Amino acid sequence: MAWKIPVSKGGLGPIGEAKVKVSVNGTRVGVRFIPDEDKDLPEGTITLNVEDCPKWVRAGRFIVGLNEDLNKMTLIKPIAGMARLRFVRLARNRDDEIILQSVETKWGTHEVFKAVFEITSPDKWAGMQVTKRFRFYFKPFVDGDKTVAGISKNPERSAYAAELLDWLTYSGVLEKPLGWKSQDPVRLLAKIEKRAQTADRELLATFKDGWVEQLYPVEEDEDEGFGNDPEAEFDEEFGDGPVFLDEDGNPLPEDDENPPF
């Protein structure tokens, strides 16, 4: 049998549902992935230094991503439920340039960009940053004597165009005409980013499988019925290592042979 040459994953490691615990002194983070027959996830407990995790890391069950070497947490986000959030910025590369990338689908090639949001409530998720990808469905239109940006697809026929239009509307970007004299895509995105940051509107989001599924405007009388953090128990002890906190921030007893996670 021929030798199978090792292939780098480009720094990408496992991503899946995991139970996360934080040590009492706040310096270590334990991660145990929930088995998934469709994914190649590491077994047992992986212990990380807290500085190698996003600053909003906390105890609970989340979608977690690690790097290829399993020594850094690259993402942690809610699995499912509802939350309030605010726009932070558009995703950028290391040179601080807004990212507009082409992606291949079975329906063709599309340009996409990502918006970064920060969760404001419920408290158990507050401070976490999540992203939502939008298709760049813009094209120039003439509005009187000005060139403005318009939606290039019919929102009544395209779900992607509809969610783009919804976000622009709910975020306050469309309070005035969206001029686009330069017709430069990145400059348009920079203008959209600035308007959304200035408006600073809170939105309501639903999550499914770790993704922001839908965005809605927040009504002043909305009930605070947020969050649907799935609960699960590990089949075995979390593992040797530092003392961990439960999801309410209380230390777990060191002599508990079957801790409730």
Image: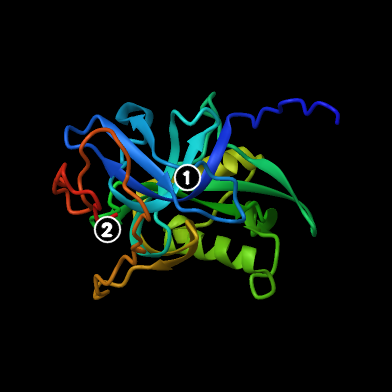
Image quadrant where one finds the C terminus = bottom left
Instruction: Say whether residue 247 is visible.
Output: yes
User: As shown in the figure, which amino acid type bears the numbered disc 2?
Assistant: Ser
Residue 237 position in % (x across, y down): 31, 47
Residue 79 position in % (x across, y down): 43, 58
Say above or below: 102 vs 168: above
Instruction: Say whether residue 183 is visible.
Output: no
Local secondary structure at mark 1: helix
User: As shown in the figure, which amino acid type bears the numbered disc 1?
Assistant: Glu
How packed mark 2 is, by other alpha carbons closer than 10 Å (few <14, some 14-19, many 20 or more), is some
Nearest to the observer: residue 9 or residue 5: 5
Residue 58 position in % (x across, y down): 28, 45
Q: Any mark on residue 121, and which?
A: 2
Mark 1, residue position: 193
Residue shown at 36%/36% (left/top)? 54
Q: Earlier along the polypeptide chain: callout 2 or callout 1?
A: 2
Nearest to the observer: residue 250 or residue 108: 250
Label 1 near label 2: C-beta < 8 Å?
no
How packed mark 1 is, by other alpha carbons closer than 10 Å (few <14, some 14-19, many 20 or more), is some
